[in-house]
Image (tube, rainbow, N blue to C red):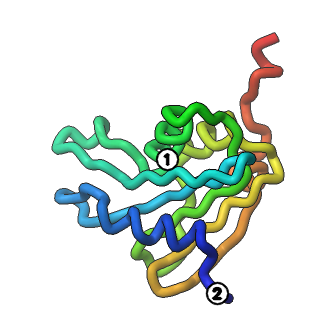
Amino acid sequence: MAETELMMAARTVREKAYAPYSGFKVGAAILTVHGNTHVGCNVENVAYPEGTCAEAGAIAAMIAAGETQIAEVAVIADSPDPVPPCGGCRQKLAEFAAEDARVTLGTTDGTIRENSVAELLPGAFGPGHME
């Protein structure tokens, strides 16, 4: 399977990750419903809980650009198996993407796994719960 442009964007930004403590670099790319791509990489901090995930960084870039609707996501890491987003990032993705939005998870050696947002976070908490 050929690597998509979205996964290539995630692969490129992954190299910019700041991961001096774990050495585990992650890149994420978001395609919006308007066709724009926004990227993010993980940024570690010596106080581990203060770090930022790649997916959260890409979402922040999307919001800063004035967009709020995710059409598709790609995430890549150097791991034996594709690495899914953490629980917090799954909730963040569910905030801005439809349940059927595709999330492609990849490894640097080319292994790919595709999921929908709903598959990653079944029974997501959403705005309807706030009514």
Secondary structure under badge 2?
Answer: loop
Q: Nearer the viewer, residue 93 or 69?
A: 69
Mark 1 lies on residue: 58
Viewer-closest of 62 and 73: 62
Residue 102, position as x, y percentages in the image: 74, 59
Q: Secondary structure at mark 1?
A: helix
Q: Residue at x 83, y 52 (%)?
A: 100
The quarter of the picture where residue 24 lies is bottom left
Give residue 95's quadrant in the image. Answer: top right
For disc 2, the marked residue is 2
Q: Is residue 9 left or right of residue 101?
A: left
Contact between labelled residues 1 and 2, with CB atoms less than 8 Å apart? no
Check the image and report above or below for 36 versus 111: above
What's the residue at 82%, 11% (across, down)?
A: 131
66 in relation to 94, above or below? above
Which residue type carries mark 2? Ala
From this view, report whether residue 50 is shown above or below residue 46: above
Query: Percent position (x, y) of residue 83?
Result: 52, 66
Instruction: Answer left or right for 18 relative to 101.
Output: left
Residue type at the position of mark 1: Ala
